[in-house]
Structures are given as C-alpha cells and as structure tokens.
Image (cartoon, rainbow, N blue to C red):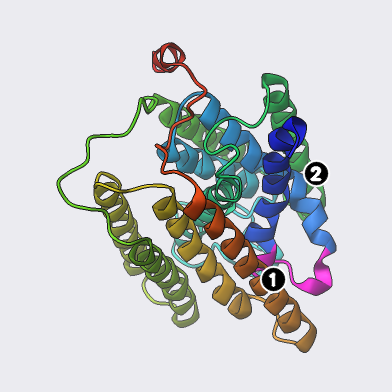
Amino acid sequence: MTKVTRRFAPALVLVFLAPFVGELLLGNTPVRLIFGYLLVLPMYGFGALFIRELSRRTGRGWPTILILGLAYGVVEEGLADLSLFNPNFLGQHLLSYGNLFGIGWPWWFFVLTLHAVWSIGVSIALAEALFARSSGPNPWLSRKGLVVSGLAFGFGAVLVHFVGGQGYQLSAGQAALSRLLVAGLVTVAFLILPQRGVQAPDSHRAPSPWVVGGTAFVLTSAFMAITRLAYTLQLPAAALILVYLMLYGLAVFAVWRWSRRIGWNAEHRFALAAGALLTYAWYGFVQAPHDVLDIIGQAVFALLALGILILAGRQVRTDKPTPDVPNSVPNAALSRAGT
C-alpha cells in the first residue's frame, strides 16, 4: 500500500461506510430507493470524517467522538431534514407521542442516540478497525483535508435541507434552539481533556471481547425493541425515557469499568461496535418495507455488514494492542490542546 493510499483509503472508506450504516443497514433507505444513499452521503460520510479527524487531531477519544455525534444528530435532524420539529415528518407524526413543550421527547432521545452511537460512533470504530494495522487512531487527513471535510459536511446538510426538508419552515426559536444545542454539545466535547495515555487499570482482567460484543448487542437490541414496542402500544412516554436512561447508565458503567481493566484493547473496542452493528442488521428487516425486493436488498446489506465485521475483526486481532490516543500527536501538543 502506497503512502497516499494509506492516508486516504481509511477516510474514503468512512465516507461511504457512515451512510451505509446510518441509512441502508437500518432499513431507512430500502433498496428500491437506493439513490437516496447518494443524497445523504456528503452529510453522513463527511460528517463522520470531520468528527473523527477533529477528535483525533486534538488528542481526544471516544467520549468526545460520541458527544460530537450528538451534535451531528442535532444538525441533521434539527437543521437539515427537520424531524425534531416537523410534526408531519414523512407523514409519521413522530412528535405526537410524549410531546411536552412542543418537543416529542421520545423521538428526540431515540433519533439522537441513533446518530451518536451508530451513524458516528459505530462507523468510525469500524473504519478504524479496518485500518488498525496501518493507521489506528492517528489522523488521516492534513489540516486542509480537515477543512475540506467540514465544508463537504456543511454542503451535505444544506442539500438534505432543501431536498428532504419537505417545505417545513423552522421558527426563529426552533432554529435558535438547534444552534444553541450544537454549540453547547461541541463545547462540552472539547472541555474533556485530551488523553495522555492508558489509565492505570484495576486489578481485574478485561472480559473476553465476545462478552463485550454480546453485551453491546443485548443493550442496543433492547433499545431498539423497547422503542418499537412503546410506539406500537403507546406505552407511557415517561416510562420509555426512564428505560432509555437505564440503558445509557448500564452501557456507560460497563464500558467505563471494563476499559480500566488489564488487557482492554482494540479488540474490545471493535467488539462494542460489532455488537451494535449486528443490532442494526436484524432491526433493518423490521424497519424496511416488507416486500420481496426490499427484503432481499436488506439481506444483501446484512451480509455486507457481516463481511465488514469479518475483515475488521481480522485486522484488530493481528494488530498490537494500542491505547486509544493518537501516537503522532506530541505530548506538548496534547497539553496545549487541553488548555
């Protein structure tokens, strides 16, 4: 692999992988509407790439990536396709369930989680796993490339707004709330200090990657299943949000504890992404239209996802365990970034 290929191949893979995970595998874009993949590719793909590069170049790790993923979700759903505010988005009336103060709280929790965890988090984790031996968590682009990816993301969001906004007009308050949320989340993301190395582990060994991946699959599957059940049966919205908070707490606590243990490495981080991806693989069959063509298309997407997991798994198993911090960023630069 040439030097140029090593630099740009991971970035290019992430650009195409993020909309595949976020739209095709989820079943939001069935095979008969495959052209929609190209419409959302600049927003999804360059959004994930911009977040990944910004986080890695400043020495940040997964907390920053996931919080920026939430900010991405607000941009897409609040400023681009407007599903956070449009009461008749795609004719589904998503905001009527659990609406309080003009906000459909269950939908907000659900869709912003999808973007933080899957559209951004899983996509970046898989792309890094696929190139674990050649790049790991190091930056892929130059500063100029970072700027270009940010501009491409902005163009993609504007494109989705004009094509997919369905003519809905944001009020001044809705637009201000969206921008305030994005600014607040970005601020919080960068208040997190850069990582300066591996934290001192506790005395226990990290569980097997299979246990980690299985836990991720169970928790993310529960998240999707309880959402479907609550919307179908119109269960109390407060109960659904309480379940969401419990699942968030369990996931954060488990990862926090396990990541401090001896032996936690790239295989475990990949296992988290793999478990979550497999949840999308089965849920896509629930989400996609139930006709023969779309079911076949969804099966192809699921098989492609499995192929990606196999390739990425081989890469991380043959790679040496590395801390989740770019080794190309000098300690002095990390210290400056945290001030």
Q: Quadrant of residue 238?
A: bottom left
Per the rendered image, the range of residues in magenta is: 24-34
- Where does residue 291 sit, x and y in percent of width and height? 75, 87
Mark 1 residue type: Phe
- Where does residue 22 sit, x and y in percent of width and height? 63, 58
Mark 1: few, some, or many residues within 10 Å (few <14, many ≥20)? many
Measured along the vertical axis of the image, is residue 79 above or below residue 32? above
Q: CA distance from mark 2 to mark 1?
A: 25 Å
Quadrant where the N terminus lies? Answer: top right
Q: Residue furthest left?
A: 203
- Where does residue 333 sit, x and y in percent of width and height? 46, 13
Q: Which residue: 46% across, 65% down?
A: 275
- Where does residue 266 sit, x and y in percent of width and height? 43, 48
In the foreground, 320 or 184: 320
Q: Which residue: 76% across, 35% down?
A: 2
- For residue 171, say whether it is visible: no
Mark 2 residue type: Leu
Q: Which mark is residue 301?
A: 1
